Amino acid sequence: MSGLPLFGGALLLTLGALLAGSEYGWGTLKTLLAQGPAG
């Protein structure tokens, strides 16, 4: 794996958020997106 594109990760996170729910899912998504690029 030569490094998964950030777009791929973001897409998976978005799908996960939608499947998880609304507030909880989006809250987690925002947190992951905020920590992802920074990390």
Image (cartoon, rainbow, N blue to C red):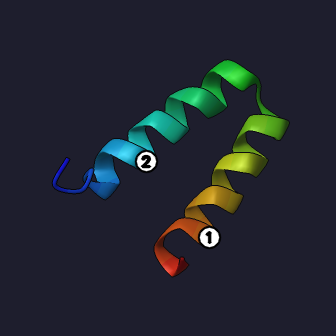
* Residue type highlighted by circle 2: Ala
Foreground of the two, 30 or 38: 38
Q: Residue furthest bottom?
A: 38
- Would you identify the image quadrant in which residue 30 lies? bottom right
Q: Is residue 6 left or right of residue 27?
A: left
Q: Is residue 37 left or right of residue 19?
A: left
Q: Residue at x 20, y 47 (%)?
A: 1
Q: Is residue 36 above or below residue 5?
A: below
Q: Residue at x 70, y 60 (%)?
A: 31
Q: Residue at x 65, y 19 (%)?
A: 19
Q: CA distance from mark 1 to mark 2?
A: 12 Å
Question: Which label's residue is closer to the chain start, 1 or 2?
Answer: 2
Mark 2 residue element = helix
* Residue type highlighted by circle 1: Gln
Foreground of the two, 21 or 32: 32
Q: Is residue 6 above or below residue 35?
A: above
Mark carried by residue 35: 1
Q: Residue at x 31, y 50 (%)?
A: 7
Disc 1 + disc 2, Cβ < 8 Å: no
Mark 1 residue element = helix
Query: Residue 24's x, y, as percent?
Result: 83, 38
Mark carried by residue 10: 2
- Would you identify the image quadrant in which residue 25 lies? top right
Q: Residue furthest right?
A: 24
The tally of labels here is 2
Foreground of the two, 3 or 10: 3
Q: Is residue 1 left or right of residue 6?
A: left
Q: Residues within 10 Å of mark 2 (few under 14, many from 20)?
A: some
Mark carried by residue 15: none
Q: Residues within 10 Å of mark 1 (few under 14, many from 20)?
A: few
Query: Residue 39's x, y, as percent?
Result: 54, 77
